[in-house]
Image (tube, rainbow, N blue to C red):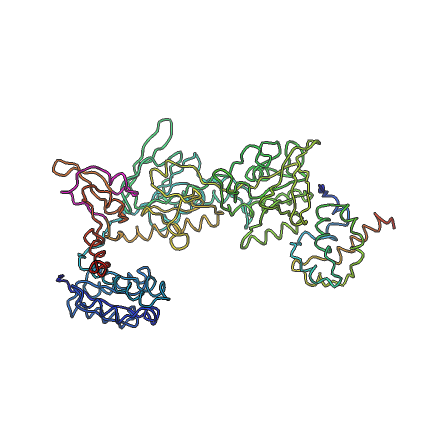
Amino acid sequence: MALVNPNFAEEIGKPEAFNASACMNCGVCSAVCPMGIELLPRKLFRYVLLGLEDKVQKNSETIYSCLLCKMCEANCPAGVHIAENVRSLRYYLNKKVYNL
Amino acid sequence: MSDRRIGVYICHCGGNISDYVDVDRVRKAVEGEGGVAVAKTAMFACSDATQQEMASDIQEQHLDGLVVASCSPKLHLHTFRDVARRAGLNPFQYTQVNVREQCSWAHTDDREGATDKAIRLVRGAIARTALTEPLEPIIIETVPRVLVVGAGISGLRAAIGLADLGISVYLVEKSPLAGGWIGKLGKMYPHGKDGKSLIAQLINELKKRENITLYTNAEIAEKSGSIGNFDVNLRVRGQEDTTISVNVGSIIVATGFDAYQPEEEEFGFGLDGVLTLPQFKELLDSSAGRPVFNGREIKNVAYIYCVGSRQQPEVENANRYCSRYCCNAAVHASIIALEKNPGMHQYHLYRDMRTYGKFELMYSQAREMGSYFLKFADDGPPVVERGYDGKLQVSLKDLLTFGEEIEIKADVVVLVTGMVPRKSPELVDVLKLPLGRDRFFNEIHPKLRPVETMVDGVYICGSCQGPKNSIESVASALSAVTQSASILKKGYVDLEPLIASVHQDLCNGCGECVATCPYAAIEMEQQQGRSVAAINRALCKGCGGCVPLCPANAIDLKGYTDAQVRSMIDALLKETCQNE
């Protein structure tokens, strides 16, 4: 059982910087991903939105394998700034997990 | 041998009929039938040229009966009745045979059989037509007044609409105040105006119109009469009950809905902090600043959708329907909550979002403002409990997070409750309104006759006929206004004369027919010192339910008399009878 933590999304960045609430889980991003990353971005964003912190931390490798090519962003029907969100996640991991 | 002069026309319908039914063989088979004076085939019986030909045949050949074997009477009954009428033949001496749907379309694999069946059906129609007599439509004069039951937004708007057409209105409200649900609401979607001011605006308009009389604390006690002329007794509660009698041409029922009341422990209902959507909306409407519950600021809210709607069939008296308004109302409530407290976290636990039409924009707005949406499976409803820390906790499997088990701590859990039919057995009893499977009032046809009921002259509108938002309720109220006005402004209605009639000399006064009539159209009356049944011509629908029940065979259905039906059966079974 994962406990929802509403403060986590706010911790990751200013709410305007990380914005995935418009995501409707259509899956276009996963379909067009040249790296074939299944987890990014929609599944990972769900974890962030609900504040499932350990799920995010467990998937740090995925977060770093993103090319930031923005194929997903260009195709997103809900206009989510996916690449920006991935950057915010990296910033959080650098600080929190790797203490950089 | 019949001395009638009947014209029979068999239609090709282009090839719709003649591709499978040998129309010439049908014509030859029936042209020698007793009473047939003219038998023809036609490429399109409904074309102007053929209609013209039928009309001149009727006049020149002095026909006194007409049979057209073509399509469904639903399509062309009135077309050919009009041909008869134009040519001076009584339209009720016309019979339509549906050989397209019943022969050619149904038996594309068997042309012989389809043709044989068509012959029998046409012969049956000829037999029926040979025994027709001229009938006249029943003309009922109408009174230019309407009774509107229920003074919510639908009833109020209907009353104003009727008054503006010059029709007097009696508006009856059961509670002490007009305004209904909307009269208690604050900010509404999609315009952002509040319900209280909408109702105040309508009441202000009501007061400007002298031809509307509003009775509050009042109910319908008794009704008699029929379309165009109802006598209704109203019971007005006060220190002493008073009865007021009104005479109206039609009745519009706009009695609205009740909010679903969850069972004890249903999604934690009964726990402190578990509210229904109407309760939460009231809380929001009454908060000037940040919404507060039990003296503490509300920081986390969980909404559980579809409470009391789309219930699984195992639930006792399950509400299987979608209540239609609640997704929008809950999403809107969350937007208001965020406006009042931008820091509030809101979790929407839904089965399916149905923010149809323009309200989809509101759903997007709620997501962009930061409401979180989680989806649970039909068979995996969320569980609401009081946690060890005293907080409410809601757990579910979130399908949008790939079946992850999620737990949410909430200050307030909002049960998004649907609409249920308002219990009004006395109204059902007095007005004889039919209920649908969902126990809301039932219209005749949801698309084509959406505000008319099986009781002529009684209309339904608003959420008493099924879940509706206020926009849809007012639209249906104005539809009921138009339907009422169309009969009342004309001054009369004409009804089909194909109704039951009693041979009073045969009637033994047993009263079985009175008990069985679903329209209360039969009453006992005194004739030459004895009690006999009499049909109210305005109420009878011609369903025929009383006919076979009568032990004295004293009731006949005009247009479908026992003699006619018997002769049709004989004609249908002609070969069988001869062979045996």
Q: Which of B89 and B345 is in front in this view?
A: B89
Which quarter of the rendering shows the N terminus of chain B? bottom left
What is the number of callouts on the image? 0
Q: Which of A32 and B282 is in front in this view?
A: A32
Where is residue B112? Give x, y as percent. Answer: 31, 67
Residue at the spot x=28%, y=42% of the render? B517
Rendered position, B239 above or below B431: above
Where is residue A78? Give x, y as percent. Answer: 65, 58
Q: In this view, does B548 lie to the left or right of A1?
A: left
Residue B510 among those drawn in magenta: yes
For this orientation, the residue located farthest to the front is: B580
Q: Is residue B80 left or right of residue B289?
A: left
Q: In which quarter of the image is residue B415?
A: top right
Residue at the spot x=55%, y=48% of the render? B189
Where is residue B448? Give x, y as percent. Answer: 39, 55
Q: In which quarter of the image is residue B232?
A: top left
Residue B187 among those drawn in magenta: no
Residue at the spot x=72%, y=62% of the render? A33
Which quarter of the rendering shows the C terminus of chain B? bottom left
Q: Is residue B578 left or right of residue B334?
A: left
Residue at the spot x=35%, y=69% of the render? B16
Where is residue B564? Give x, y as percent. Answer: 20, 54
User: Predominant secondary structure in magenta?
Assistant: loop
For this orientation, the residue located farthest to the top is: B239
Q: Which of B20 and B205 is in front in this view?
A: B20
Rendered position, B202 above or below B86: above
> Which region of the structure is painted magenta?
B500-521
